[in-house]
Image (cartoon, rainbow, N blue to C red):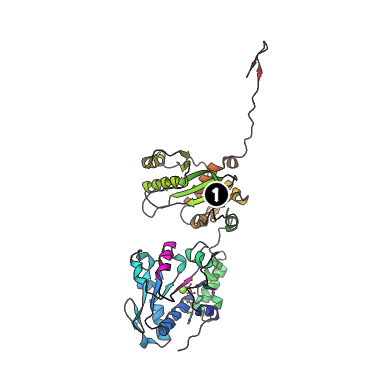
């Protein structure tokens, strides 16, 4: 059997625990891994392989059809047995198609004897899914393969394989349409159209660049990375700040909960992003846990729409908290600007990476939030740092109070 492989993927033919191909649309990533699976099954009798996606509502969404086509195109159909929802491979092996969201830490154990897991469209894999999958695939010589179109540096698969510390020996290639010798003319038409009509998103869709940072964003990745710290220095004061979502129906906005501190060095430190979706009592409990964990001295909460509700919610969980209520009188992005100025003066550090918060920050522009939903995490962050840096936000006091001694006559002075 002969397989013709685009040069760009040749490095991935060596054995390695981790193999990744990222890039824009139509670069041949899916076809390459589908062929590699067929090849693996022919070389390793009894191969057990799982093709996973974060969400797989039906087999139609899986790579099953593509692998079937490859089996036929390569003329090896007699070695395989294609069943309704799986493919039997030579020597009693199997190829399965699964969604990570359907797995629990219990059910994932069924994959422990597997030799290859291929994560397709892996940019949507959650960190929970990656954490579950990695130690599960543990057969001798087993490999983890991923193909993805990067959205942000904080996509868990991107952080794993292209971050500062990829797993040792990981083989990762970047593939784009120009590397695909079979790039179809239909796709070329689509590409050329996007190049003309979507100049801002073209590089993301077709060249494998990250989603564009909003134009005019008041934070950028550079300022966040340049000040990042692995550990917090001695801290004088810590607050937990909260931007509660108005409605708590399932699927509604998140409650922004962020822990920030003022260092003894007079710099700001972002310690934890504990935002969550849930009921009011769930956010209140999370806040209470954060206060204890970080020994925070106050909780800063926004009270605009909810009136006293927000305070009551917190007090119904716990009465001994010092609550500082703040009222939003200006727009979110207006409140955020002085805080972004602090970052640009290198006066704020993130301790560790807070990926989802940072994604929101980089989509906050001088004229509003350009991301999806509402920037609850940024809001909570801004409230916390505003509390810790009151002078910076309000500006220096414009007057100075002086004590004046007044002469009362008879040789006496009033103090
Ligand atoms: N090995 C191959 N043999 C034949 N055709 C191929 C091969 N690789 C790629 N192609 C052609 O190129 C097209 C794009 O390839 P593929 O779907 O693998 O790209 P991709 O990188 O997975 O893109 P997307 O991000 O759109 O999923 C395919 O639809 C097919 O027409
Ligand atoms: Mg693909």
Of residue 282 and residue 108, the one placed in the foreground of this image is 108
| Depth order, front residue of 106/157 | 106
Q: Is residue 235 visible to the viewer in this orientation of the structure?
A: yes
Q: Is residue 287 left or right of residue 176?
A: left
153 part of magenta stretch: no
Q: What residue is drawn where x is 36% and y is 64%?
A: 105
Q: Where 313 sits versus 5, above or below?
A: above
Residue 80 percent coordinates (x, y): 36, 84
User: Residue 388: x, y in percent?
Assistant: 54, 42
Q: Is 287 situated above or below 190?
A: above
Residue 161 placement, left or right of 281: right
Displayed quadrant of residue 199 = bottom right
Q: Which residues are magenta?
A: 126-152
User: Residue 197 placed where, x, y %?
Assistant: 55, 67
Residue projecting furthest to the left:
84
Residue 159: x and y, percent?
51, 64
Rendered-image quadrant of the C terminus:
top right
Residue in the image at 39% along x and 71% along y: 61
Quadrant of residue 57 within the rendered picture = bottom left
Residue on which the image places disc 1: 269
- Tell me if residue 331 can be seen: no
Q: Element type at marker 1?
A: strand
In percent of the image, x 64 and y 31: which residue is there? 400
Name the residue rendered at 58%, 42% in the picture. 393
Foreground of the two, 233 or 363: 233
């Amino acid at each position: 059997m002969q397989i013709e492989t685009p040069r760009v993927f040749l490095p991935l033919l060596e054995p390695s625990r981790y193999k990744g191909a990222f890039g824009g649309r139509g670069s041949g990533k899916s076809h390459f891994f589908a062929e590699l699976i067929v090849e693996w099954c022919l070389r390793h009798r009894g191969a057990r392989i799982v093709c996973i996606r974060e969400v797989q509502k039906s087999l139609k969404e899986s790579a099953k059809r593509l692998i079937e086509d490859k089996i036929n195109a390569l003329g090896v159909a007699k070695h395989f047995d294609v069943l309704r929802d799986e493919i039997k491979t030579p020597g009693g092996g199997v190829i399965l198609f699964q969604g990570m969201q359907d797995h629990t830490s219990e059910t994932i154990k069924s994959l422990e004897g597997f030799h290859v897991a291929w994560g397709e469209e892996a940019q949507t894999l959650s960190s929970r899914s990656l954490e579950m999958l990695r130690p599960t695939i543990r057969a001798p010589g087993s490999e983890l393969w991923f193909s993805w179109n990067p959205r942000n540096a904080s996509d868990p698969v991107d952080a794993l394989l292209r971050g500062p510390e990829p797993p040792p020996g990981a083989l990762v290639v970047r593939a784009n349409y120009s590397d695909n010798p079979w790039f179809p003319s239909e796709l070329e038409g689509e590409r050329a159209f996007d190049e003309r009509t979507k100049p801002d998103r073209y590089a993301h869709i077709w060249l494998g660049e990250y989603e564009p940072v909003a134009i005019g964003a008041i934070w950028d990745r550079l300022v966040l990375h340049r000040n990042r710290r692995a550990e917090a220095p001695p801290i004088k004061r810590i607050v937990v700040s909260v931007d509660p979502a108005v409605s708590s129906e399932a699927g509604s906005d998140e409650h922004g909960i962020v822990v920030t501190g003022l260092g003894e060095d007079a710099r700001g430190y972002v310690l934890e992003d504990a935002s969550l979706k849930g009921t009011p009592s769930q956010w209140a409990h999370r806040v209470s846990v954060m206060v204890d964990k970080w020994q925070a001295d106050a909780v800063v909460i926004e009270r605009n729409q909810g009136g006293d509700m927000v305070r009551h919610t917190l007090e119904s969980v716990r009465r001994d908290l010092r609550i500082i209520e703040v009222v939003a009188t200006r727009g979110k992005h207006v409140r955020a600007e002085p805080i972004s100025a602090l970052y640009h003066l290198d006066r704020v550090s993130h301790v560790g990476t807070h990926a989802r918060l940072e994604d929101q920050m980089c989509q906050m522009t001088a004229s509003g939030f350009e991301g999806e939903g509402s920037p609850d995490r940024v809001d909570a962050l801004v409230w916390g740092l505003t509390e810790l840096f009151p002078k910076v936000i309000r500006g220096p006091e414009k007057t100075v109070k002086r004590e004046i001694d007044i002469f009362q006559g008879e040789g006496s002075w009033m103090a």
